[in-house]
Amino acid sequence: MNMLMQELKGLQQNTLEWRKPKTGETCTHMHVERWNGIFMCSGCHTEVRDAEIIRRETAAMNKLGEEDLSEPKDSVNRGVTIAFLVAFCQTFDLYEVTTGEVLRDFIVPLTSGSRCRFVELDAMQKSGVVGRATTFISHCNKALFGDLVAALCDGGADLTRRVWPDIFTVRQWPSSKSDLHFELVIEQCPSFMVVCPSIVEVRNMTDADVLSRRFPASAKAGVPFFRIWCL
């Protein structure tokens, strides 16, 4: 595991230009996503209209789809061990950042070279941490990554068990071949885990708040029961 973390740290050093642009800098749309046929920049959250970027991203998207020979049911074989997630969290000090920030600052930059899934990085493939998942993980990107890791470790969990957190297992780049076959992963996993953080604003809700469904914004952002569009 130490060797894997050293390799990932080395890869990270080569992608530092992916850090969030400084205030006042023009966004260069380094990471573009595609939703409902529209290219969106994950950095500035605006639609990408530049013809050259659209041409480049369309070509890359089609190439990825053509080269991906995997079947939707194969996704369950992209699980990672809990031990890996613990080491990853500790190595990069990710306990107090959101899962979305982990995606932005680590998953996307480290896969930018080939636009592969994180588990398909050479360092990951040869490490032995990737394999068939036994637990599907449902979580929120706006919740803390440390809470996700802590939940997986709770109760003396077997750290060699492989789980399926989508930021590591799903391609985070546009592809003409869909990668969001979560239902097939769930069908093949013998267990399903929902990571729900404890939120102060929710604990402080009154009976009247609950009955009138006046849920705080922090709950809608961090509690997966509000964010189950993918299921």
Image: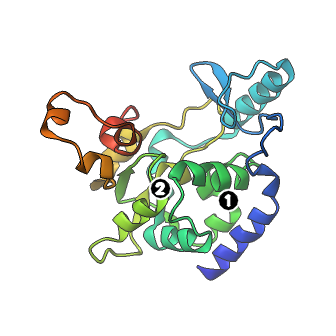
User: Residue 198 shows which numbered tag?
Assistant: none
Residue in the foreground of this view, choosing between 139 and 128: 139
Residue in the foreground of this view, choosing between 160 and 143: 143
Give the CA separation, mark 1 to mark 2: 15 Å
Which quadrant would residue 59 be assigned to in this image? top right
Q: Which x, y percent locates residue 100?
A: 55, 48
Instruction: Classify mark 1: residues with Cα within 10 Å, few (<14), some (14-19) or many (20+).
Output: some
Residue at (67, 59) in percent of width and height: 121
- Up the image or down, 159 lies above or below 137; here it is below
Relative side of 223 to 22, left or right: left
At label 2, which amino acid type do we have? Asn
Work out which quarter of the rendered image holds the N terminus and state it.
bottom right
Relative side of 57 to 187, left or right: right
Foreground mark, 1 or 2, reads 1
At label 1, which amino acid type do we have? Leu
Q: Which x, y percent locates residue 209?
A: 20, 34
Reading the image, the residue beneath label 1 is 121
- Up the image or down, 113 lies above or below 44; here it is below
Residue 76 showing in the rendered view: yes
Work out which quarter of the rendered image holds the C terminus and state it.
top left
Instruction: Classify mark 2: residues with Cα within 10 Å, few (<14), some (14-19) or many (20+).
Output: some
Residue in the foreground of this view, choosing between 52 and 124: 52
Q: Which x, y percent locates residue 219?
A: 34, 42
Reading the image, the residue beneath label 2 is 77
Residue at (50, 67) in percent of width and height: 85
Residue at (51, 62) in percent of width and height: 96
Q: Secondary structure at mark 2?
A: helix
Which quadrant would residue 27 be assigned to in this image? top right
Residue at the right extreme?
52
Q: Secondary structure at mark 1?
A: loop
| Visual colour scheme | rainbow
